[in-house]
């Protein structure tokens, strides 16, 4: 790597692109319950903003212990508003849902049943959502790439999908900025640019993914995310629920065997193998001294019920 490829010089997202690191299979593997709470910011690099009621701080601690993803969000157009919007979402495959509540003051959040949410059950805290919620990471204090690349994407998506788009704290994977997540599907897209927003907005509205920007679906093991990607590309499947993971297992040859059901009922078996980069590089602008060799997956075999595809 040349000396000018440093996070401070070009940004970790630019380094990822320069190194050719793929987006696939990079969505968080352990995310099945989400809680989005409106706060205008500024957001600290980690933790909670100052001045919050103790009831909210206790809930955030309890949510973390229960495995619930908590994100601070804010309106793209109007940061300071008289009410607080809260979204609770369950993202288990086959049983996704999202609820929205509007609070007059943040401490009302204490009435939400975290136990139900952690178990994937709607807590009945708000009205059931009818549209997908679109979340864009713009958390500049966590990583400058997220704000520099995320904010323009959030603004352009908001113009095409008014009322559905929110800025968010860290979603995971600074180097994949701009990072966009849709709920309750928990579909992650990365490397999104302003030029991508018309295509992405149309895809989200139609319940589709954009394969070239797809990172994966949160809550699925990375090998399963990779297998889903390869099946989508091979068969041209764009529907969010067009590929359903059934089971997966490691194989003695070092691959992972993943069984999938396609939207036309076809049974598909995909073998993927983990592959690690040989180039160590910074993966965040926030900690440029920390380097890693990120991994990805390669397709080994793909078969459907009728034979090799």
Image (spheres, rainbow, N blue to C red):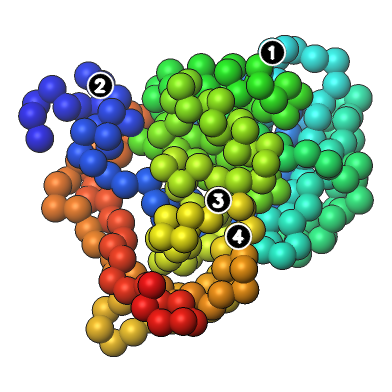
- Image point (45%, 31%), residue name: 192
CA gap, disc 3 to disc 1? 30 Å
4 displayed left or right of 227: left
| Mark 4, secondary structure of its residue | loop
Viewport quadrant of the C terminus: bottom left
In percent of width and height, residue 69 lies at 63, 48
Q: Which residue is mark 2?
A: 10
104 displayed left or right of 138: right
- Of labels 2 and 4, earlier in sequence is 2
In percent of width and height, residue 77 lies at 69, 13
Q: Does the image show residue 7? A: yes
| Mark 2, secondary structure of its residue | helix
CA gap, disc 3 to disc 4? 7 Å
- Of labels 1 and 2, earlier in sequence is 2
CA gap, disc 3 to disc 2? 33 Å
Query: Furthest residue to the bottom?
Result: 252
119 up-or-down from 248: above or below: above
CA gap, disc 2 to disc 4? 37 Å
In percent of width and height, residue 38 lies at 73, 28
Q: Which residue is mark 1?
A: 77
10 up-or-down from 201: above or below: above
Q: Which residue is mark 4?
A: 242
Q: Residues within 10 Å of mark 3 (few under 14, many from 20)?
A: some
- Image point (68%, 62%), residue name: 92
């Amino acid at each position: 790597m040349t000396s000018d490829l440093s996070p401070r010089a070009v940004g970790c997202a630019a380094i990822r692109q320069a190194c050719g690191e793929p987006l696939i299979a990079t969505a968080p593997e352990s995310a099945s319950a989400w809680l989005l709470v409106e706060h205008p910011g500024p957001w600290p690099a980690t933790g909670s903003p100052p001045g919050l009621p103790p009831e909210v701080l206790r809930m955030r601690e309890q949510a973390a212990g229960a495995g619930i993803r908590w994100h601070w969000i804010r309106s793209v157009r109007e940061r300071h508003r008289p009410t607080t919007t809260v979204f609770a979402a369950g993202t288990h495959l086959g049983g996704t849902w999202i609820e929205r509540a509007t609070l007059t003051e943040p401490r009302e959040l204490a009435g939400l049943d975290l136990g139900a949410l952690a178990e994937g059950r709607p807590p009945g805290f708000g009205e059931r959502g009818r549209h997908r919620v679109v979340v864009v990471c713009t958390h500049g204090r966590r990583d400058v790439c997220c704000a520099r690349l995320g904010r323009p994407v959030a603004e352009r998506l908001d113009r095409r999908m008014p009322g559905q788009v929110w800025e968010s704290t860290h979603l995971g994977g600074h180097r994949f900025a701009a990072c966009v997540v849709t709920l309750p599907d928990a579909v992650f897209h990365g490397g999104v640019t302003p030029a991508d927003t018309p295509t992405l907005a149309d895809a989200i509205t139609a319940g589709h993914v954009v394969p070239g920007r797809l990172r994966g679906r949160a809550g699925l093991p990375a090998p399963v995310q990779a297998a889903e990607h390869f099946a989508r590309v091979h068969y041209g499947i764009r529907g969010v629920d067009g590929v359903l993971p059934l089971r997966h297992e490691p194989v003695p040859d070092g691959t992972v065997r993943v069984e999938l059901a396609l939207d036309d009922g076809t049974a598909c078996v995909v073998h993927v193998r983990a592959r690690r980069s040989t180039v160590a590089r910074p993966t965040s602008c926030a900690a440029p001294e920390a380097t890693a060799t990120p991994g990805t997956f390669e397709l080994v075999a793909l078969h459907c019920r009728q034979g090799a595809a």
